[in-house]
Image (tube, grey):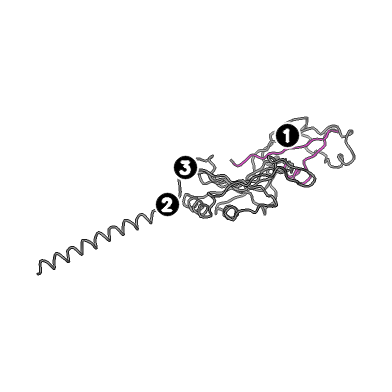
Amino acid sequence: MNNRANRRIGGVIVVVVFALIALYAQTARGSGQSAADVPPWDGSATSIVVQLRQEGGMAAVHERIIPLFTLYGDGTVVAVESAAAPSPGLSAPVWIGSLNRQQIESLLRDIEATGFWKLESSPTSSEVSEGFAVIAPQDQRSTTLLVHLADRQHEVRLYPTSDTTTPEAFQQVQQLVQTLRPADAQPYLPTSYQLTARSLGNVTTMSAAQQAALVEWPFLQIALSPDSSHTLKGSFGQEVGNFLDQEGFAVVQAGVGYQISYLGAAPR
């Protein structure tokens, strides 16, 4: 009787032990699930992992356009600062910071949870009116979200048309990246600038309104000529950029009008 009871107790103990082992294994797998949910990405400094950008439209561009948000593989973040003062040579003020691996994984998990990977780009209409202009599909203003991982990538481009609403998942990802600001974020100022001048013709051939739109070019050390190009650096480059931001990009020198393009060096 004792032997039978002992065998029964021993069998119960074995069952309990195996159950505990199985439970432990399941728990261990579960604890590693969050890390497994995040696919690897290219960790190089030039690889784009997440990007939000706007493109197209009829507005003239005289300065370098920086995407609204870019996360690179090494954790560097470059983003537009909408509330700051203009930055010379750039279409908008910019900050630069960094995320560690855990922060990148957290962002990618949050993006996954929105349903972004299931979104599709919106079709373009045959034409869109902007003011008095009619814009061809390839020139329409659009907003694009890109996520690029090692094993997959997805790009969604939306065009603002009257019969299309922005999908909630798209809005959620926009909110995620545009409210993200690393602790070490700092304003970015270019260290060099590329100035290019395009001739608008002699002022004597212009109408009074066209002449009134021109401002005198004050930097005599920079001789403008048709299709001329100059590289400016440091504080002088910032001074020229500040002048253009305040006075405009249509200037006159020695009786000739010029349209100026002023590109600050990109952060990456």
Question: Measured from the top left, where is residue 193 in percent x and y?
Answer: 68, 38
Is residue 249 shown in magenta?
yes
Q: Residues within 10 Å of mark 1 (few under 14, many from 20)?
A: many
Question: Measured from the top left, where is residue 43 in percent x and y?
Answer: 48, 42
Q: Residues within 10 Å of mark 3 (few under 14, many from 20)?
A: few
Q: In terms of secondary structure, where does tag 1 sit?
A: strand
Circle 1 is placed at which residue position? 196
First along the sequence among labels 1 and 2:
2
Mark 3 vs mark 1: in front: 3
Q: Residues within 10 Å of mark 2 (few under 14, many from 20)?
A: some
Left or right: 203, with 65 as reference point = right
Q: Amino acid at mark 2?
A: Ala
Q: Residue at x 42, y 50 (%)?
A: 36
Circle 2 is placed at which residue position? 35
Circle 3 is placed at which residue position? 151
Q: Amino acid at mark 1?
A: Thr
Q: In terms of secondary structure, where does tag 3 sit?
A: loop
Is residue 259 shown in magenta?
yes
First along the sequence among labels 3 and 1:
3
Furthest toward the bottom, the residue is: 1
| Span highlighted in magenta in the image | 240-267
